[in-house]
Amino acid sequence: MVHKIREAADFIKSKLDFSPERAVVLGTGLNSIAEMINDPIIIPYQDIPELPVSTAPSHAGRLVAGFLNDTPIIIMQGRLHYYEGYSMAEITFPIRLLKAIGIKELIITNAAGSLNASMVPGDIVLLEDHINFMGTNPLIGENLESLGERFPSMNEPYNLKMIAQAEDLAKEHNFKVQRGVYLAVTGPNFETKAECKMFAANGADLVGMSTVPEVIVAIHSGIKVLGISVVTNLSNIFHAEAHSQEEVRANAAKAKQHLEILITNVLSNRGAKND
Ligand code: HPA
């Protein structure tokens, strides 16, 4: 695996004449954030050696690099999902790649269903913890010490300073953010009512089909993570109707403006008290 990561990283680095230390992974319906970069360097995923390519409908699948207010950043526009049939190693390969490029801080965004009555479609939730309910783990298998330790701590998977920074920004710009716990399922079916009740009773606020494997690998790699969910639908606890892809997309669009403020300012370290 190490030589594949190296090959992909060398390819990306050969295209950049700057060294980004911050990156963002964009989830469903959030691709427009990439448009905020001036003169972007756009690299389609299929051009990157060893990088698996996404099949999901609203996942563009390209790496965008450039400057956001003077700060060099990378945007991973589109991600791979376990439900598409990729292995855990494949869906987390982009995180290994980001680490090899030199990324130290990462914002991971997603679209999520709400299990909590005070988190409604359009709301932005900063992840403070997660529950891995995918029944597997991207770190299973031989551990390569050069990539990270065998038993990484998950005591603080989401960086508290980055959470505080995002909260300060939301206050400053006059919009609401909440903190919540994200539970990851494999999908691709949405959860049953009984599953939702169980998840909520056990401390989850949000449910989704991504993020957790990527966060686990980011923590293993020593990357600081800020996780941001956009609530796109109420889970089955609150209504029994099936949610369409259109519903998910429309609600993600509502939160776009606020998310842009959070992402751009956290990535360029504005309004911040970082270490
Ligand atoms: N469940 C799982 N994943 C999701 C949901 C949901 O309700 N909404 C968006 N992604």
Image (cartoon, grey):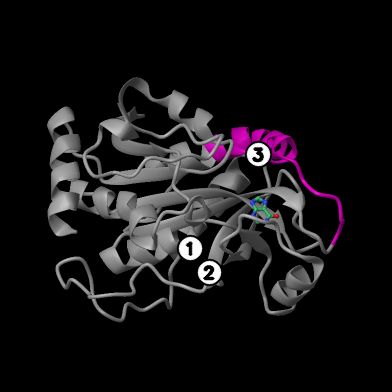
Q: Position of residue 185 (x, y in %)?
A: 59, 64
Question: Gap in Å between the C-alphas at discs 3 and 1?
Answer: 19 Å
Element under disc 3: helix
Of pointers 1 and 2, the one earlier in the residue sequence: 2
Element under disc 2: loop
Q: Is mark 1 in CB contact (under 8 Å) with mark 2?
A: yes
Which stretch is magenta?
A: 238-260
Say which mark, if any, is on residue 134: 2
Say which mark, if any, is on residue 238: none
Q: Which residue is mark 1?
A: 212
Q: Is mark 1 within 8 Å of ligand 1?
A: no
- Residue depicted at 36% across the width and 56% down the height: 92
Q: Main secondary structure of the magenta part?
A: helix
- Residue depicted at 77% across the width and 58% down the height: 235
In front: label 1 or label 2: 2
Q: Is mark 3 in CB contact (under 8 Å) with mark 1?
A: no
